[in-house]
Amino acid sequence: MADISISGLNQYFGENQILHDITFDIFPGEKVAIVGPNGAGKTTLFRVLTGELPYESGSISIAKDRTIGMIDQIPVYQPEDTAEDILRSAFHRIDDVRTRMKQMEQRMERNDDSRLLQQYGALQAEFEAMGGYALDFEVDKVCNGLEIPREMREKPFDVLSGGEKTRVNLARIILEDTDILLLDEPTNHLDLDAVEWLGNFLNEYKGTVVTISHDRYFLDQCCDRIIELFEGHADFYAGSYSYYAEERKLRFAQRMAEHNHQMEELKRLQDQSRKMHQWGTEKMHKRAFSIDKRIARMTVADRPKQQKKLSMSFGDPNYETENVLKVRGICKSFDGREILHDITFNVKNGERIAILGDNGTGKTTLLNILLGLEEADSGTVKKGDGLKPAYLPQVVTFENEHRTLVDTLIYDKNVTPQTARNRLGRFQFSGEEQLKPVSSLSGGEKSRLRLCELMYDKLNLLVLDEPTNHLDILSREWIEEAVEGFTGTLLFVSHDRYFVSRFASRIIVLMDGEMVDFHGNYEEYLAFRARKAAEKAAAAAPKPKKDKPKRKGGTKPLEKKIAKLEREISETEAQSAALDEQMAAAASDPGKLIELSEQKDALETALMELMEQWEDLSSQLEEMQGDEP
């Protein structure tokens, strides 16, 4: 039975139909990605699924007793609640059992009813089965994976940034172990390592996952089915994102060939009918009418539509200065914490450098210092002669956002209205969209508009801060195509592994205020990092024991000690078994049971110590016997 079943779903915004007759099933354990350009209805579909948004017609059913988790469904919390409290709210069912156990413990102190003890034992077993004794371990594991440090967990949830709240809530729904995860852009606020961890987690996750994401590496890592929304309709692909990307091209080619064949056949019949009518004989007229009926019965498939792509190059190919930037001893602190310490490197003409690092390591700050938008506490940045940089920040703003898109280009770039319209059209701002105010654009659309301005300048240094963060896959491909055609020097910060892998020929990593400067591409850097981690692990591993001199008397003294220990272990195990029988007999006597439990704990501790001694002596004996000829 399907976890999620949608049939004939239709949804409108005003007169615009966003979803048209959408029908599909998602079965338990499937990992499904919903892709498509911004505005295709992906988030609308999510909101309809959760009941947050009513729909026009159709049906939606969720399997009974299946729980759903969503990133933006933040639980009700008090102003004083910390991020840790939000994380722990994932265990409300376990907390209910824990509370009942404590209440029963209080009753057991006043009442020695054997039924209470049996009920308590059942609750204790349920608590253990639910993982109650491993809560701290699970919370730490997920928080470490999503890079939620202890200091963030201790802060009031209210004071966290939007991205931090999203990370905490993502951790919460993972800890809840829900049956169905609905994840809308789950990688947006995660570092590269955290995205890798999340992808691996979802791979192992036994439940159902439905995700909206524009991170192509992430989709390849954890999704086995793709649903594409485009112009209100859905297409389905049984495979990873890479499979979808290739299969989509094949389907488009097949549909185009089918459309062309049908149009050729239609034209052939129309020409044939026209000629027969022109010949004017009764026999020919009859044949022509027969062909006309055949034409009327024909169904010609609509010409398939393809998402437009950008294809152009920009930059100044004649810039020849060797050293674009010379960075020396940059230091920067905030609130007494140094985030950049003695950062020193050169940027050569034509290099493509990715600046990586965890959130809060100073990547954006470094970019701002390099561009002169922010002052360093100490150090210098020397720019090459004739350097003309352009900057695309994370959050793009315009001087006057009440202006239309056309007017913005006219004022900012001093171009004619027709030139402005032509340039906007190349960036898929067409028709009435060009007359919208800039303030109505999404973050991704503003980035696209700024790129539209930049691409016609004679630039020789392009600086990008998370250039793909708010963009759909098509827009990401636009930027990649533009960057591919850029002839100058590229310096960028990105968490988009696909983008980093495609463009970086050098990696600068910021961590703990310091930097690692690696000359090579992203795959080579990952291999380098893996080697370093292996070397570190090998260095931390216990060193092999040196050969010990043989003891006088051979191995007999050691064998006697081991035999004695084995007798003591057998005796202790027998005492423990006897205590088990006494505890079973004392089930109706809480006082006696507690006393026997304490004796049992003491015996278990003694047994562990004896076993450790036995293992140590046995290892020594094996070494001595191995040395004997």
Image (cartoon, rainbow, N blue to C red):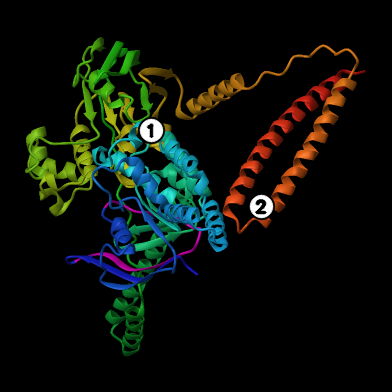
In the rendered structure, does residue 20 fall within the stretch colored magenta?
yes
Q: Is residue 507 above or below residue 602?
A: above
Q: Which residues are magenta?
A: 16-38
Q: Residues within 10 Å of mark 2 (few under 14, many from 20)?
A: many
Q: Which residue is mark 1?
A: 150
Label 1: few (<14), some or many (≥20) within 10 Å? few
Identify residue type, mark 2. Met
* Quadrant showing the C terminus: top right
Q: Which residue is mark 2?
A: 583
Q: Residue at x 87, y 25 (%)?
A: 560
Give the Cα distance between marks 2 and 1.
42 Å
Q: Is residue 147 left or right of residue 574?
A: left
**Image mark for residue 409:** none
Residue depicted at x 44% and y 66%: 65
Please indicate whether residue 104 sits to the left or right of residue 41 in the image: right
Q: Quadrant of residue 117?
A: bottom right
Q: Nearer the viewer, residue 457 or 92?
A: 92
Q: Main secondary structure of the magenta part?
A: strand
